[in-house]
Image (cartoon, helix red, strand yellow):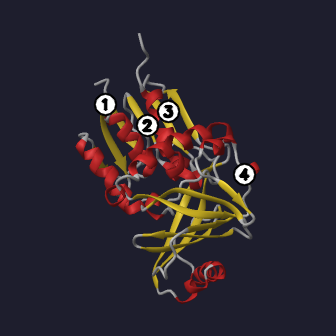
């Protein structure tokens, strides 16, 4: 049927794209190797901000489209997992941001950096909400081993890091992120630092399940096992900003592999050798949440049949 679509990928990009397609009247199936709660997206810090993502000329529009959706979802934080929370990007300057920054209300520069009130997303809760929304739209999520892109009339490839083998696209690579969840000692605002040394960064996000501490940005590292020494350094860096973090009990360790791509995000339509349509939507690096709705709308438009 011309309205049938298979979306490959069950992370935030795949689920968001599937929602846009399903709510436009398409019959959608989602194929994914693991449940969304086990995806890289479930590990993400969840702060809206165009971070480690290209191409710059397209990221602004995708990010702002997504921001408007999150601002609306933040009206129902317990249900959606989206809250508007204040914080500081230490070391950032307004003139160092892209044109998109002029459309973000409330950004202000201080001697310490750029302060803002931004969407902060509890990813496990948010992903469950996306699954409920898909179910309401009649979409099925099928957990299955996907060794090749399906040979079907219309496929949307949101396979993230899996695109390296499925497309295949050797320009896709992992950027390893390690985080620590501690009991929140009273931190109410998020914090990030622009400084990065040896693939190590500093940030913390107050989430309902605890205070999420980070992190790392290790290029080309496929290791999913938490490293105890790395965790100790993460805690120490965050404690230099907020000393009470040093004594906060550790609740969990997390590792995720950001699906980066050297030229940046690929949102593109191609016609297969058998005349099918394959729409790609992958390569979002560490900012999949930030651009998810903007990229989903563009991918869905590319999946639409030609008018006339």
Residue occupying the point 43% across, 32% down:
300
Of the numbered discs in the image, which one, if any, rests on residue 298? 3
Disc number at residue 26?
A: 1
Q: Nearer the viewer, mark 2 or mark 1?
A: 1
Under circle 2, the secondary element is strand
Residue at x-position 34% and y-position 50%: 130
Is residue 207 rendered to the left or right of residue 87?
A: left
State which quadrant residue 136 falls in.
top left
Label 3 crowd (10 A; few <14 / some 14-19 / many >=20):
some
In terms of image quadrants, where is residue 179? bottom right
* Residue 132 drawn at (x, y percent): 27, 50
Q: What percent of the width, then of the height, locates residue 219?
A: 66, 61
Query: Of the numbered discs in the image, which one, if any, rests on residue 94?
Result: 4
Tell me how far mark 4 sits from mark 1, CA to CA. 41 Å
> For the C terminus, which image quadrant?
top left
N-term mark: 3 or 4: 4
Marked residue nearer the N-terminal end (3 or 2): 2
Q: Toward the viewer: 184 or 87?
A: 87
- Compared to 117, does 150 lie above or below? above
| C-alpha separation, residue under disc 1 versus residue under disc 3 | 15 Å
Q: Nearer the viewer, mark 3 or mark 2?
A: 3
Do the CB atoms of the residues marked 4 and 2 lie less than 8 Å apart?
A: no
| Relative image position of residue 292 (x, y in whole percent) | 49, 45
Q: Is residue 308 above or below residue 134?
A: above
């Amino acid at each position: 049927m011309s309205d049938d679509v298979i979306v490959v990928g069950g992370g935030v990009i795949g689920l968001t794209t599937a929602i846009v397609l399903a709510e436009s009247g398409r019959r959608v199936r989602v194929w994914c190797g693991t449940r969304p709660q086990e995806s890289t997206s479930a590990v993400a810090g969840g702060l809206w901000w165009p971070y480690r993502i290209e191409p710059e000329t397209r990221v602004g529009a995708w990010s702002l489209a997504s921001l408007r959706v999150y601002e609306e979802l933040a009206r129902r934080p317990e249900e959606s997992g989206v809250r508007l929370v204040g914080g500081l990007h230490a070391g950032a300057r307004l003139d160092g941001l892209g044109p998109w920054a002029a459309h973000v209300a409330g950004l202000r520069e201080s001697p310490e950096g750029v302060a803002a009130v931004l969407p902060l997303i509890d990813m496990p809760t948010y992903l469950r909400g996306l699954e409920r929304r898909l179910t309401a739209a009649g979409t099925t999520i099928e957990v299955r081993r996907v060794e090749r892109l399906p040979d079907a009339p219309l496929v949307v490839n949101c396979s993230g890091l899996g695109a390296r083998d499925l497309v295949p696209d050797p320009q896709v690579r992992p950027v390893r992120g390690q985080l620590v969840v501690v009991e929140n000692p009273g931190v109410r605002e998020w914090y990030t630092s622009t400084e990065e040394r040896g693939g190590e960064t500093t940030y913390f996000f107050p989430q309902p399940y605890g205070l999420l501490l980070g992190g790392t940005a290790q290029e080309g590292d496929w290791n999913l096992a938490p490293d105890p020494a790395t965790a100790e350094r993460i805690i120490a860096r965050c404690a230099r900003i907020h000393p009470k973090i040093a004594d906060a009990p550790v609740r969990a360790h997390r590792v995720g592999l950001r699906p980066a791509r050297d030229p940046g995000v690929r949102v593109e339509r191609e016609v297969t050798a058998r005349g099918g349509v394959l729409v790609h939507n992958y390569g979002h690096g560490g900012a999949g949440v930030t651009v998810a709705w903007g990229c989903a709308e563009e991918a869905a438009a590319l999946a639409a049949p030609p008018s006339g």
